[in-house]
C-alpha cells in the first residue's frame, strides 16, 4: 500500500473552514482515556491494542469493519454501577444499547438485572439464562403475545405504559392464574439531553402516562383495583446522554409527590421507584461524564430528601443505564478506502462501513472522535470528515476531526465509544452486511456476534 503524499487538503488551524470542531490535539497519536475503553493502548510499534491484542491482528482475523469490545472494561463498569448503588438498590442494564448472549452472561455474573423492550430482547435474555425475576419488560406497544410470554416466563416486572396496557396485562396475568408485578411509567414534564434539561410540557410524546391533569394518579387508581396486578412502583425516564443531575432532581421530586398522593388516597406506600437511564458518556474529549458512585450518591440523596420531606419511607431505587455501561467499552475498526482532499474545505476519508454500522451521526448529529490505529504518524494534522460507503451524502461517521496528513488507503482507523446504539441500530442499508462484535479480554479474542454474510441476506429473500 502506498503511503505517498496525496494532493494537499487543509492542514493548519489557520486555514481551516468553519465547523464544529476543537483545535487538533497536540499529538494525534495520544489516545485520550476518556473516550477509549480501558485496556486500549499502543504497542511498541505504535499499533492500537485492546485487551493486549493489536488491531492489525484483529483486522486480519475478523475483518473490518468490526466492533471490538473490551470485556474487562464492560465488566468493570457494570460492577462499578452495582457497587455504587449497593444492595439497597437495583441496576437494570438497558439491553437496547447493545444486547447479546455473552453480554447477558456477563451481567448475570456481575449481579446486574436487565431491562428488555421487545420480544426479541426478552428471548435473548432468557436464552442466555438470565433469571426471569431479574428482567424488567418495557415498551409502549407490547403485543399480547409478548406480554403473555413475559408473564409466563415470570419476569420480575412489567413497566406499564398506557391505560390500555394496564387492563391488557391484568387480563393476561389473571387468565394465566398469575399476579404480575408492575411499575407504572409516568411522564413528569421533564426532558433532559446532554447538558440541558427542560421542565415544561414534555408530556407530548409516546411514552408513559402524564402526571399532568391527574392522569398518572388515575392510572394507579385503576391498576390497584385489578387482581392480576401487583403495583410495586413508579417509573420515570427523562432522556439520554445527560450530564446535569438537575433534571433527575425535578423528576424525583415529582415522582415522590405522586407516591405521597397515592399514600394519602389509598393508604398504600409503593415500595419502588425507577429513575430510568440516560446518563451520559464521553464521545469526545470535551465531554465530562460523572462516575457511577457520584450518580448513585446524587440520586439516593435526592430521593431520600424528597421522601423525608413527604414523610414517606424511602423506596427501593432502581436505575437503567445502557449507554453508560456499554458505550465506552467498544470501538469500531475501519479500513480506509479512499482519501479525497477538497481544496479549501476538508479531506473526505471513506471507510468500509458507515451509516449501516453507526447511524447516530446521521440521525442525531452525534459527535465522535477518531484515531489512526494501525500506526502512529508525525505528519501534520488534517481536518477530515470520515464517511461511509453508502449511497447517501449524509452517510457520515465522524463529522469533523483531525487525522494525520499522511493517511492513506489501507490504514486502519478506529472510532471510539461506539458500544451503545451502534450495533443495536445497525441496518442492512444498501445490503451492507452488519459487522461482528468481537470481545477481547486478557490477550484472547472471540466473536460474540458474528459478521453477517451474503447468505444471511439471501436466506431472508425468499424470491
Ligand atoms: N430506560 C428506558 C426506559 C429507556 O427508554 C432507555 C433508553 C434507557 C433506560 C437507557 O438509556 P441510556 O442509559 O442508554 O441512555 N438511540 C439513542 C438512544 C435512545 C434511548 C432510548 N431509551 C441514541 O443512540 O442515542
Image (tube, helix red, strand yellow):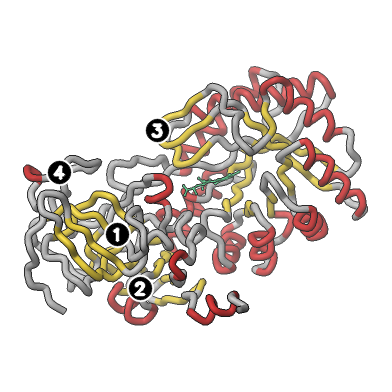
Is label 2 in a helix, a strand or a loop?
Answer: loop
Place residue 287 in its image quadrant.
top left
Measure the C-alpha gap from mark 1 to mark 2: 15 Å
For label 3, the crowd category at 10 Å Cα-Cα, with few meaning under 14, some 14 to 19 and many 20 or more, is some
For label 2, the crowd category at 10 Å Cα-Cα, with few meaning under 14, some 14 to 19 and many 20 or more, is many
Camera-side residue: 448 or 384? Answer: 384
Measure the C-alpha gap from mark 3 to mark 2: 34 Å
The answer to whether 221 is drawn above or below residue 102 in the figure is: above
* Mark in the foreground, 1 or 3: 1
The answer to whether 353 is drawn above or below residue 249 in the figure is: below
Where's residue 324, x and y in %? 47, 48
Read off the residue under disc 1: 387
Q: Quadrant of the N terminus?
A: bottom left
Read off the residue under disc 4: 17
* Mark in the foreground, 4 or 2: 4
Where's residue 33, x and y in %? 30, 53
Q: Upstream in the sequence, badge 1 or badge 4?
A: 4
Q: Is residue 87 visible?
A: yes
Q: Is residue 303 visible?
A: no
Measure the C-alpha gap from mark 4 to mark 2: 31 Å
Is label 1 in a helix, a strand or a loop?
Answer: strand
Camera-side residue: 213 or 243? Answer: 213
Read off the residue under disc 3: 195
Where's residue 437, x and y in %? 46, 69
* Residue drawn where x is 7% and y is 45% of the image: 15
Where's residue 291, x and y in %? 43, 43
**Residue 64 got which mark?**
2
Measure the C-alpha gap from mark 3 to mark 4: 27 Å
Q: Is residue 276 left or right of residue 25?
A: right
Amino acid at each position: 500500500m502506498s503511503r505517498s503524499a496525496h494532493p494537499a487538503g487543509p492542514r493548519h488551524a489557520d486555514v481551516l473552514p468553519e465547523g464544529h470542531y476543537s483545535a487538533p490535539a497536540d499529538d494525534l497519536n495520544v489516545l485520550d482515556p476518556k473516550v477509549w475503553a480501558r485496556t486500549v493502548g499502543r504497542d511498541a510499534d505504535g499499533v492500537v491494542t485492546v485487551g493486549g491484542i493489536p488491531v492489525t491482528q484483529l483486522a486480519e482475523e475478523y475483518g473490518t469493519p468490526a466492533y471490538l469490545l473490551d470485556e474487562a472494561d464492560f465488566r468493570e463498569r457494570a460492577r462499578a454501577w452495582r457497587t455504587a448503588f449497593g444492595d439497597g438498590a437495583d441496576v437494570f442494564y438497558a439491553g437496547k444499547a447493545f444486547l447479546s448472549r455473552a453480554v447477558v452472561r456477563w451481567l448475570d455474573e456481575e449481579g446486574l438485572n436487565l431491562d428488555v423492550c421487545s420480544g426479541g430482547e426478552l428471548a435473548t435474555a432468557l436464552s442466555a439464562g438470565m433469571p426471569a425475576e431479574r428482567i424488567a419488560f418495557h415498551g409502549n406497544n407490547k403485543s399480547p403475545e409478548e406480554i403473555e410470554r413475559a408473564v409466563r416466563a415470570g419476569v420480575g416486572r412489567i413497566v406499564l405504559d398506557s391505560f390500555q396496557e394496564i387492563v391488557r396485562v391484568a387480563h393476561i396475568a389473571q387468565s394465566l392464574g398469575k399476579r404480575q408485578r408492575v411499575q407504572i411509567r409516568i411522564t413528569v414534564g421533564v426532558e433532559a439531553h446532554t447538558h440541558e434539561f427542560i421542565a415544561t410540557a414534555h408530556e407530548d410524546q409516546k411514552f408513559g402516562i402524564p402526571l399532568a391533569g391527574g392522569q398518572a394518579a388515575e392510572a394507579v387508581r385503576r391498576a390497584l383495583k385489578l387482581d392480576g396486578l401487583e403495583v410495586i412502583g413508579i417509573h420515570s425516564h427523562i432522556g439520554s446522554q445527560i450530564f446535569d443531575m438537575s433534571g433527575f432532581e425535578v423528576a424525583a421530586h415529582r415522582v415522590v409527590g405522586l407516591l405521597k398522593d397515592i399514600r394519602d388516597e389509598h393508604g398504600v406506600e409503593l415500595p419502588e421507584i425507577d429513575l430510568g437511564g440516560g446518563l451520559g458518556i464521553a464521545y469526545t474529549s470535551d465531554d465530562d461524564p460523572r462516575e457511577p458512585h457520584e450518580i448513585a450518591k446524587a440520586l439516593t440523596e435526592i430521593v431520600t430528601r424528597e421522601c423525608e420531606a413527604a414523610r414517606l419511607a424511602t423506596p427501593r431505587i432502581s436505575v437503567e443505564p445502557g449507554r453508560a455501561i456499554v458505550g465506552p467499552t467498544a470501538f469500531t475498526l475501519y479500513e480506509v478506502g479512499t482519501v479525497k482532499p477538497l481544496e479549501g474545505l476538508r479531506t473526505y476519508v471513506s471507510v468500509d462501513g458507515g451509516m449501516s454500522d453507526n447511524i447516530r451521526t446521521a440521525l442525531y448529529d452525534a459527535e465522535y472522535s477518531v484515531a489512526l490505529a494501525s500506526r502512529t504518524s508525525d505528519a501534520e494534522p488534517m481536518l477530515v470528515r470520515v464517511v461511509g460507503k453508502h449511497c447517501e451524502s449524509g452517510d457520515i461517521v465522524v463529522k469533523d476531526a483531525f487525522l494525520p496528513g499522511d493517511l492513506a488507503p489501507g490504514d486502519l482507523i478506529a472510532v471510539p465509544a461506539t458500544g451503545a446504539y451502534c450495533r443495536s441500530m445497525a441496518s442492512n442499508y444498501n445490503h451492507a452486511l452488519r459487522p461482528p462484535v468481537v470481545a477481547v479480554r486478557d490477550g484472547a479474542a472471540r466473536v460474540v456476534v458474528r459478521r453477517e454474510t451474503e447468505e444471511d441476506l439471501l436466506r431472508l429473500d425468499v424470491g
